[in-house]
Amino acid sequence: MMMSSKRYISKLLLSLILIFLLSIPITAIPSRSPSRFLGNFAKHHKTTDTINKTYRYDIRYFTQTLDHFSFSNLPTFQQRYLISTDHWLSGGGGGLNRFGPIFVYCGNEGDIEWFASNTGFLWEIASTFGALIVFPEHRYYGESMPYGSREKAYKNANSLSYLTAEQALADYAVFITDLKRNLSAEASPVVLFGGSYGGMLAAWMRLKYPHIAIGALASSAPILQFEDIVPTETFYDIVSNDFRRESLSCFDAIKKSWEEIEVEGKKENGLLQLTKKFHLCQSLNSTEDLSDWLDSAYSYLAMVDYPYPSSFLMPLPANPIKEVCRKIDSYPEGTSILERVFAGVSIYYNYTGTVDCFDLADDPHGMSGWDWQACTEMVMPMSSSRNNSMFPTYNFNYTSYQEQCVKEFGIKPRPRWITTEFGGHDMRTSLKMFGSNIIFSNGLLDPWSGGGVLQNLSETIVALVSKEGIVPLSLTA
């Protein structure tokens, strides 16, 4: 998406958020007393985003309930959150004695500081609205670990059983309510923000807790990517098309590479040769492990194919898919497909050139809890089509999916629970009749856009769509 388009969408978002805020009657401003949320125990912190802007915030901890839906005597846990008062209550004036909105980012499946440093739009509009900014961390990610440690929280299915979207939304509802009360800020309207899974949470929270927040901006939020609501091939077809639009020869090389990997892996010492060819830190146990690693790179590249350098997932150049394909296509005729593919994927995994070997199990952003969520309620069926996809052809098989979850966690997924809890089938009617004040922002080059809301459903359920773009929350004005 070009800069002019980014500015246009930014202005639209600003206008819509302003409409949210103007719809709230201004009430008397209560006096404020000292709050445990703003105590001296917090460490002042700075973080730098992908375009070298510095964001200032304090790190706090909130004592959170482990199970919001029972009255069992369970231990509490410390939920981390980031808070910035730099622009609260006036257009950059600061202070704690005047009215101002609260912008809440719904934490995703990872360390909250990682998301805070890559959500430029939220920071940039705070001064315009005189907003307080808050980033609560999602339970079981980052430092917000029940039972006191990641080891204990991830011990088994029993300890992980409280890792659900419903519990996370209840965390945010309780946290926001307590925050406003302790800051004597009951009159401050709350607007929710989120991208990807965080965008899903923002939209769902606006529907589930409309009294907590007046509106939500859900960016790249695939709330329809469940059951058979959208074709299961949608995600990988979009990823594949992103590569094909850059270079058909690049698309073809990647498409042919999967068979090359299988052929090489079946040779004597084939897995060892693949380990060396792809500079892996540990010897491969199967070709599937290598294919999954490559699959992840291509999928993530499609999610972050920004027209500017970024470091959200990995340090990457502008238009990274273009650079990957340029690298793959740069080799002379006769070069092996696997050599070309390795060179291309190194743009994603090693653009800085500082990595000596690649660890397939590396989880730099602490996202492994998603495996549990995908095996319980976040069942998002995906397939790869023969003609449109550059990935190996396969159809989603729920039986195999369930077997894998039983093997890994000893539990069976509930594939229909999300649509039961939050809706999905005939979502158009549900949102139109029962929803309001939600902006769904999508770029059609983003593979998650296929499961998103792409049409305006009412005057206050608005879809902002960029035909040739990725629309992240790091959107800059």
Image: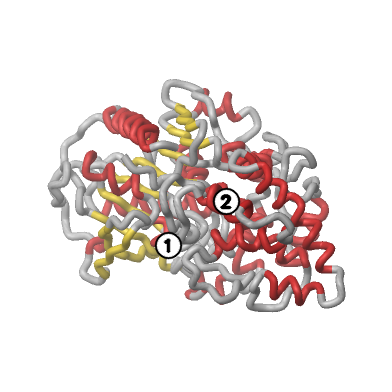
- The residue closer to the viewer here, 120 or 398, is 120
Mark 2 surroundings: few (<14), some (14-19) or many (≥20) residues within 10 A: some
Position in image of residue 47 (x %, y %): 31, 62
In the image: residue 55, left or right of residue 110: left
- The residue closer to the viewer here, 197 or 424, is 197
Which residue: 34% across, 49% down?
120
Position in image of residue 283 (x %, y %): 72, 78
In the image: residue 415, left or right of residue 167: right
Q: Which amino acid, by three-letter code, is at mark 1?
A: Gln
Colour basis: secondary structure
Which residue: 58% across, 55% down?
327
* Quadrant of image for the C terminus: top left
Q: In this view, does 384 lie above or below 22?
A: below
Position in image of residue 397 (x %, y %): 81, 49
**Which one is earlier in the sequence, the residue at label 1 or at label 2?**
1
Which residue: 60% across, 50% down?
325
Q: In this view, does 153 lie above or below 118?
A: below
Q: Can residue 214 be seen in this view?
A: no
| SS of the residue under disc 2 | helix
Between the residue at mark 1 and the residue at mark 2, the CA separation in whole angstroms equals 49 Å
Which of label 1 and label 2 is nearer to you? Answer: 2
In the image: residue 164, left or right of residue 270: left
Q: Which amino acid, by three-letter code, is at mark 2?
A: Arg
Q: Can residue 378 be seen in this view?
A: yes
* Residue furthest top as drawn: 459
The residue identified by callout 1 is: 64
Mark identifier at residue 425: none
The residue identified by callout 2 is: 326
Position in image of residue 71 (x %, y %): 52, 59
Circles 1 and 2: CB atoms closer than 8 Å: no
| SS of the residue under disc 1 | strand
